[in-house]
Every structure is written in structure tokens, then in C-alpha cells.
Image (spheres, helix red, strand yellow):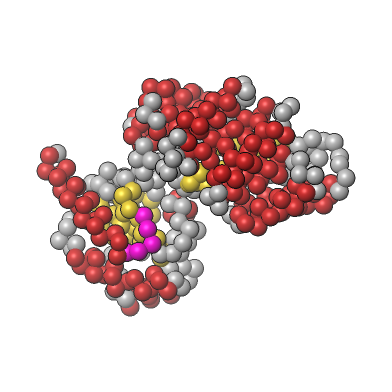
Amino acid sequence: MASFKSGPEKSQASRRRIGFGAGLLIAFLVLLSPAGSFWTTFPFARSQARQGNDTSYDSEFQKGLDLLRRRRWEDALKTFKRANEMRNKQSAECFYGMAQAYQGLDQYKNVVESCDKVIELSANDTKIQAAGYNLKGIALQAQAPKDEKKLPEAEAAFRQALALGTDLAIVHYNLGVTLLQESHDPEGIAELKKFTELEPEGAKAQEAVKLIENPRRAREAFAPDFSLTTADGEHVSLEDLHGKVVMLDFWATWCKPCVNAVPAIRDLRKRYAKEPSFMIIGISSDADEARWKDFTAKNQMGWPQYLDHDHHVQRVFDVRGFPTYIMIDHEGIVRYRGLSVGAIDDAIKKAITTAAKVATTE
């Protein structure tokens, strides 16, 4: 099931800069779900009416936004809670900030509760209410892998957002994905087409087109699009890898478990050396390029290596810890994701066998 975390996500993941200003505030808040399926952006307007202690409140609220941008979820949550105390726990924008922080922490029940407060405190502002319903839907969808009943609840939340008659185009996208996940393909495709009509440009529009062409993408964990150029100058993209079984090794020289796992990865590569469909790509988060090159050479890491300078690939795959191993099958579907290289072997064997069978029928 596609999920970018609801994390905001998840994805499974990018964020736009969050704006801030005293008085009338327009903060364009963007949130990706854990695996990248859901996305929300909306103008959050604060009342121009001045209240006591505004300077302190504005400063604390701005700090919370800054912490969100830096993905410091715990600190952001604490900061928004402090700011909310300055408004007698009646600040809709603080509850929305708290909801985003909870989303980053994968605490989806708290996201839902915070969004309910946003909706309650914004009774006179349908745009804010719609944003609250939208984020609530994202959090409910994120719980669906463990509780399928959450999908109809997510659908209901997105429909409530649309019923408010606001211009949040992204709700059509989110509702469309949810409907596809429920196997209501005609309805889901219709919503995604509405989204592409309203927002024909951008990454989400491209993703919507892919979902329209292949609704299965909403029900399977298809790998996100990515590309990189290895240390040997080879350009690699997800499209290039079609038909192959690929293990992505997210690591760093400063990560002791990563270093300890190198011999096992060498053995893995040797074991499947005669399998033309299998390959390993190392994706390092090192800051010191010279140290990285020296380490890979000394440790005979002869498989393709990439130095993820800006952590772009790490963010695309929503990698939050090291090492992380991701196995992508011949169709581009993520079949394994975990912290142990030892546990990936069975998944690789199965994927190689399946890829071979498909190749003989083509």
C-alpha cells in the first residue's frame, strides 16, 4: 500500500518554505505523507486582532515553524504547545502545527485529535477547516496498513474537506489515492483527473497521471522516482532499473553498524554474482568525500557507490536511520525495507526467481 508516511510525509519526502509574519499570517504549510502519497498546502490566516503577549506568541510560533522545517518534531511539538498556552489553548494554528509535528513522529491518533481541535476552533473559516479535515484524512490513511477500517474514515474526512467548497485542489488528489487504495478505481481516477485539471503542473500532477495510468500504484509500495550518478560516472534512475532486483544500502562511514555490515554485503554480492538481474547500490550520507572514497576502496566495496551530498535520495526514500536496506523488485515495487542485511536474503531470492520467470514469458 502506498504510503509516504503520513509524515509527513510521510514521503516519503519534500517541504516548501513556511512563511510567517505578525498580524495577518499567511503560512503555506506543506506536508508529505510517509511514503509520499499525500500532500497538503494551504493559506493559514490568523486574525488581525491583537491579543495580549503577541510578540512573545509570534516569536514562539515562528520558532515552531522553523523547527518543523528542520524536522525536529519533538522540539516543534513542545514549542507549539507553549505558544498555544499563550492563547489559552485556543489557537487553531498551533493545533495545526502540533498535528504536523505529531505526523512527523508517526503519532497518528494525536494528529487526528489535533485536527479535530483545528476544525472546532475554526468554525468561521472553511479554508482552515478544510485543511484540518485534509490532514486528518492523511493521518487516518497512514493507519490503514494496520487497520483497514481507517481507509473509509480517511475517505470521509477528505469528502468533508471538499464539501466545504474550498479551493484545496490537493484534497482531490488525496481522495483519489484513498479511493484507489479501496479498489474504487473509476471514482479514484475521476478525482485524480479533477486534480490534474486544477493543478496541471508539478510533481504531484505527474504522480497523478501515473496513478491514473496504473491504479495499482496506490495499492502497492512502488519505489519513488529517483536518479543518481555513481562514483564511476554511471547515471542510474528508477526507469533504468526496470527488470532488475536492486538492493539499496543507505549507510555512512561514521555508522558503526553500517561498517560492521560491510563483510555481509560483500558476501551477498558474491553469492549472487552470477545473477545478471541483481545489483547493489551503496548510498552514503558522508560529508567527507575523501574519507568515503578511501573507505570504499580499502573495504573492497566494488558495487556502485553514490555519495548523497544533499541527502536527496535519503529524503526521497524517507530514510531516518542507518543502516537502512531497501530491496526493489523487477517491477519497481519495494519488497523489503529493514535495518538488517541478514534478513534481506529471502526477499532477494524470491524477487530474483520471480524476475526470471517473467523474463522467460516476455
The one of 264 and 140 positioned closer to us in this rendering? 140
Q: Is residue 57 left or right of residue 92?
A: right
User: Does any portion of residue 206 appear in the rendered image?
Assistant: no
Residue sitting at 49 percent across and 29 percent down?
155
Question: Residue 81, position in %: x, y?
Answer: 71, 50
Q: Residue furthest left?
A: 360
Q: Residue furthest bottom?
A: 298
Quadrant where the N terminus is found in the figure: top left
The one of 305 and 111 positioned closer to us in this rendering? 111
Residue sitting at 45 percent across and 34 percent down?
149
The stretch of residues the image draws in magenta is 337-341
Question: Residue 281, position in %: x, y?
Answer: 32, 60
The quadrant holding residue 27 is top right
Q: Is residue 159 left or right of residue 292?
A: right
Number of marks in picture: 0
Question: Residue 310, position in %: x, y?
Answer: 50, 58
Residue sitting at 52 percent across and 28 percent down?
156
